[in-house]
């Protein structure tokens, strides 16, 4: 089990913040900044933007083509199917599930999860930090075998499990064994938001990039939390 593919779910039609993944910071679309970060993982072999066949998402396709980023187009409603098919197309053996809501995802956190998965599989079925919250919101991910994700597509018969990738696996502990990844003390802050849902989230994420990126494009979660503390966004 060697080929590791990270998929980033992305579309232009967000109801709360339309076009959010292509909003810019430091002169670059947030989706490009996120891809840069995921590509710094020591383990990920391919980063794939999983977008939709909706006409609005032609903008994402054009963006990927212009920036030499792998992409896949699939169902807008059945997101699980889209991500499964993207993994199949790019021959994933291990899937790293990410969303475009996380433009500050930390490659070190990605590698921590992949390493934990590779060292414990097949005794566990997937690893995640989404079920037991310890990381800031915006560093969310799941790592699991692609074949497990494909199996969940066959079993997921109700809409929520198709809309939210990984939910079927996470909601059936009698079938799938989970390993929870807990943040180390230096970056444990489950109440701090660096996820991209609303305008105020974008304003914060843009401010972080504008303050830190130019001096260190490989800015870490520690850097982000130190900056947030100086801004008075968090107490410690």
Image (tube, grey):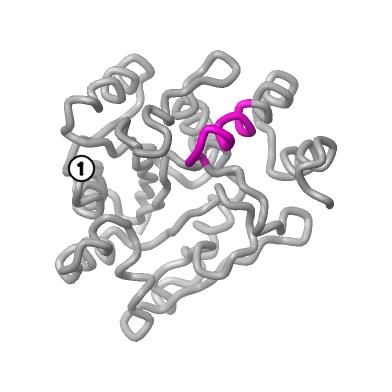
The residue at 54%/62% (across/down) is 129
Give the x, y percent position of residue 136: 63, 52
Q: Disc 1 designates what residue?
A: 76
Query: Quarter of the image holding residue 195?
Result: top right
Drawn side of residue 87 relative to residue 135, left or right: left
Residue at the far bottom in the pictured view: 174
Does the magenta-highlighted stretch encompass residue 19? no
The answer to whether 44 is drawn above or below residue 80 in the figure is above
The answer to whether 207 is drawn above or below residue 127 in the figure is above
The residue at 42%/68% (across/down) is 126
Secondary structure of residue under mark 1: loop
Q: Mark 1 packing: few (<14 Cα in 10 Å), some, or many (20+)? A: some
Q: Quadrant of the N terminus?
A: bottom left
The answer to whether 38 is drawn above or below residue 203 in the figure is below
Give the x, y percent position of residue 189: 70, 57
The residue at 35%/54% (across/down) is 95
The segment highlighted magenta reads 196-206
| Camera-nearest residue between 135 and 180 | 135
Give the x, y percent position of residue 123: 43, 79
| Camera-nearest residue between 230 and 102 | 230
Magenta highlight: main SS: helix
Give the x, y percent position of residue 74: 17, 40
């Amino acid at each position: 089990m060697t080929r590791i593919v990270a998929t980033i779910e992305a579309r232009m039609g967000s109801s709360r913040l339309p076009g959010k993944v292509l909003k810019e910071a430091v002169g670059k679309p947030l989706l490009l900044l996120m891809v840069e970060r995921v590509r710094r993982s020591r383990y990920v072999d391919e980063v794939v933007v999983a977008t939709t066949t909706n006409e609005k998402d032609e903008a994402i396709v054009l963006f990927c083509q212009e920036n030499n980023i792998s992409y896949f187009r699939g169902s807008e409603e059945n997101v699980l199917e889209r991500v499964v098919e993207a993994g199949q197309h790019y021959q994933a053996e291990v899937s790293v599930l990410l969303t475009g809501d996380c433009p500050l995802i930390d490659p070190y956190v990605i590698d921590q999860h992949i390493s934990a998965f590779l060292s414990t599989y097949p005794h566990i079925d997937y690893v995640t930090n989404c079920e037991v919250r310890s990381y800031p919101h915006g560093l969310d991910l799941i790592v699991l075998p692609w074949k497990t994700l494909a199996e969940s597509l066959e079993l997921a018969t109700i809409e929520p499990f198709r809309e939210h990738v990984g939910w079927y696996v996470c909601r059936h502990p009698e079938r799938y064994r989970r390993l929870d990844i807990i943040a180390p003390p230096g970056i444990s802050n489950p109440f701090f938001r660096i996820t991209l849902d609303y305008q105020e989230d974008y304003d914060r994420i843009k401010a972080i990039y504008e303050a830190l990126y130019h001096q260190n494009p490989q800015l870490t979660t520690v850097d982000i939390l130190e900056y947030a503390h100086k801004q008075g966004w968090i107490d410690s």
